[in-house]
Image (cartoon, grey):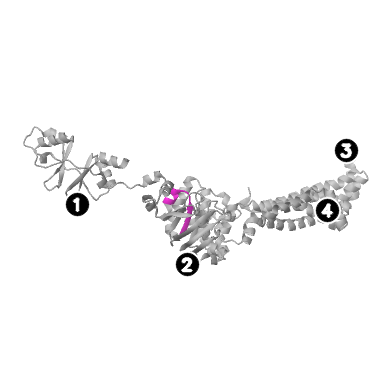
């Protein structure tokens, strides 16, 4: 045990620039993928609440994406987009779609019908109903979806190093290849901390954006 | 104010909710739409603010056909209160009440003043409640806010869709009382949907009873109670309420023929007459039939030995009533004075008949 701790210390000192690089690369990858996932999934989810007959097939398709093993999904990207950051971001974005899409859809569908009826009856336009009622009231559910997606993306992001996207996966796979436990840990531990941090930060944002009247 | 002309509504599944309806809702009245579920009362109401569009016919507000008015514009000028209350939970009470004025782009100073006025109107202290959230209020308080939110932009018409039926009985009573009081002050045209007959009788200026998309009866509450149009209405109102509201029979219905005697008759004759008819008293009238008093068997018995006495010497005056008084007053009098019977006299003092305990009981019970 002491040996391992000692070697981790060595690795930390020796590999510090690489760990920092990997972490920053990982954060970048995650944020970009998350950004696109939100950009696609939230409007799509809102669209589906307006055209509910499409909801099941489209959410079904994103579920299928989710069931594709992450390694395979990354592999699919190579013949289409080659290797590097771009195919990795695309794959991670696809991976993050489902939780956000599903939560946006169910969150908005789940808004109290009475409140919406009151809104319509008072003469709100459908845009006002969306921005003044539906989104504020569904926001905590949507944010929960974003959180789930972020944790997923951080995790799957470690595999993105296999298609040359960098990130903490680099350290892990180098460690596996050279059978160096400490090197594996030098990639895995920051990745785990990163996932927890994303979750924590997004949770605080979620709490901040939840209107006081809706806090339990 | 609001006029339905040959309006029908057929839903996509073929269900005919409203069948060729004509209805005129007057300015300033509180009209209650009532009927069993599926009778079309809510559909009728929701057609007024175009939440539901009629399949046929036209609806006018102030002689303007509403299908030609932009629905958003139309709704901002019609207050709307619903059973689920529907306050926006992420907004404060003040923001909720100010919603329609804000949508109508009122000046902030103007609507804040209005919000405070309205909170005062329903007994919610503005300083305490204006910054609270709906979840911090009781159901009754929330619906009070629901009602004043509908009043906020001062619309001439207010639609209320079973607004009090989800509340507990005590809050419901209070809110009904408040609505009646409020209506005296604000005098809006209110269309109120309910399935609760007691509520309708309590608050309505007119009640519109509906069945299968048609109006069965439309009249003032007391008129409906007195003359239910048919068995459906009778059943819908319920036997109990009809009986409770039953006006007492008139005095003439409970009159019985009196046993009379003239004042100059001997006591012996009086006793003879009482025996013959099995009575313990006789009404004393003069030759012209004018009421003088009552002679009672016990009074005669006391003085029977004295041969010289006549009926007029032992008779006593007892309170009498005029034929035009109502039975309620008579019953009150009988109770208060502990009388077993009361003579009823005509305007000129002639005896018309008497009312006895027995005659009253017989009429009221059957």
Q: Residue at x 37, y 45 (%)?
A: B244
Precedes in sequence: disc 3 or disc 4? 3
* Residue corresponding to mark 3: A1
Q: Are marks 3 and 4 on the same chain?
A: yes
Q: Which chain contains the residue that carries disc 1?
A: B
Quadrant including the N terminus of chain B? bottom left
Q: Are marks 4 and 2 on the same chain?
A: no
* Residue corresponding to mark 2: B63
Q: Is residue B196 magenta?
A: yes
Q: Is residue B197 above or below residue B53?
A: above
Q: Which chain contains the residue that carries disc 3?
A: A
Q: State the separation of the CA atoms marked 3 and 1.
A: 120 Å
* Residue corresponding to mark 1: B347
Q: Are marks 1 and 4 on the same chain?
A: no
Depth check, mark 3 against mark 2: the one in front is 2
Q: Are marks 3 and 1 on the same chain?
A: no
Depth check, mark 4 against mark 2: the one in front is 2
Contact, mark 3 vs mark 4 (Cβ under 8 Å) = no
Q: Which chain contains the residue that carries disc 4?
A: A
Q: State the separation of the CA atoms marked 1 and 4.
A: 107 Å
Q: Which chain contains the residue that carries disc 2?
A: B
Depth check, mark 1 against mark 4: the one in front is 1
* Residue corresponding to mark 4: A26
Residue B274: name its quadrant. top left
**Range covered by the magenta-colored residues:** B189-201
Instruction: State the image coordinates of residue B235 (x, y, percent, origin top left).
Output: 42, 46
Secondary structure under tag 3 reads loop
Depth check, mark 1 against mark 2: the one in front is 2
């Amino acid at each position: 045990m002491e040996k391992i701790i000692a070697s981790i210390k060595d690795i930390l000192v020796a590999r510090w620039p690489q760990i920092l690089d990997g972490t920053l690369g990982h954060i970048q990858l995650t944020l970009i993928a998350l950004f696109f996932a939100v950009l696609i999934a939230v409007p799509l989810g809102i669209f589906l609440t307006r055209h509910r007959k499409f909801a099941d097939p489209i959410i079904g398709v994103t579920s299928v994406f989710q069931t594709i093993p992450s390694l395979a999904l990354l592999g699919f990207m190579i013949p289409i987009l080659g290797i590097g950051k771009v195919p990795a971001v695309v794959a991670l974005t696809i991976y993050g779609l489902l939780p956000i899409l599903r939560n946006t859809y169910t969150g908005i569908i789940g808004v109290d019908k009475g409140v919406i009826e009151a809104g319509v009856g008072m003469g709100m336009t459908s845009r006002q109903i969306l921005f003044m009622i539906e989104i504020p009231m569904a926001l905590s559910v949507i944010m929960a979806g974003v959180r789930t997606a972020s944790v997923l993306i951080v995790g799957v992001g470690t595999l993105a190093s296999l298609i040359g996207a960098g990130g903490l996966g680099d350290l892990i796979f180098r460690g596996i290849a050279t059978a160096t436990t400490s090197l594996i840990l030098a990639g895995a531990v920051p990745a785990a901390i990163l996932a927890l941090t994303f979750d924590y930060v997004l949770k605080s944002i979620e709490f901040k954006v939840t209107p006081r009247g809706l806090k339990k | 104010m609001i006029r339905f002309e040959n309006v029908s509504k057929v839903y996509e599944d073929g269900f005919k909710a409203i069948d060729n309806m004509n209805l005129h809702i007057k300015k300033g009245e509180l009209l209650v739409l009532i009927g069993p579920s599926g009778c079309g009362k809510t559909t009728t109401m929701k057609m007024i603010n175009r939440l539901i569009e009629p399949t046929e016919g036209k609806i006018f507000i102030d002689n303007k056909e509403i299908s030609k008015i932009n629905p958003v514009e139309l709704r901002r000028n019609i207050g709307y209160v619903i059973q689920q209350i529907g306050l926006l939970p992420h907004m404060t009470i003040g923001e909720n009440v100010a919603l329609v004025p804000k949508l109508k782009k009122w000046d902030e100073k103007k609507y804040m003043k209005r919000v405070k006025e309205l909170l005062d109107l329903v007994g919610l202290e503005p300083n305490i409640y204006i910054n609270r959230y709906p979840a911090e209020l009781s159901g009754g308080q929330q619906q009070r806010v629901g009602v004043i939110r509908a009043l906020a932009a001062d619309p001439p018409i207010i639609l209320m869709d079973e607004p009090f039926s989800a509340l507990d009985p005590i809050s419901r009573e209070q809110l009904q009382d408040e609505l009646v009081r409020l209506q005296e002050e604000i005098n809006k045209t209110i269309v109120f949907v309910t399935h609760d007959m007691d509520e309708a009788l309590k608050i309505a200026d007119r009640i519109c009873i509906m069945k299968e998309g048609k109006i069965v009866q439309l009249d003032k509450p007391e008129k409906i109670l007195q003359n239910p149009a048919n068995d459906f209405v009778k059943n819908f109102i319920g036997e109990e309420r009809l009986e409770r509201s039953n006006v007492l029979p008139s005095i003439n219905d409970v009159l019985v023929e009196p046993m009379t005697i003239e004042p100059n008759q001997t006591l012996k004759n009086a006793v003879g007459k009482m025996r013959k008819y099995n009575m313990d008293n006789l009404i004393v009238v003069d030759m012209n039939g004018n009421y003088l008093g009552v002679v009672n068997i016990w009074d005669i018995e006391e003085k029977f030995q004295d041969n010289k006495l006549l009926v007029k010497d032992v008779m006593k005056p007892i309170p009498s009533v005029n034929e035009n008084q109502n039975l309620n007053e008579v019953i009150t009098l009988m109770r208060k004075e502990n009388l077993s019977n009361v003579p009823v006299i005509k305007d000129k003092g002639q005896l018309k008949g008497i009312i006895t305990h027995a005659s009253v009981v017989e009429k009221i019970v059957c």
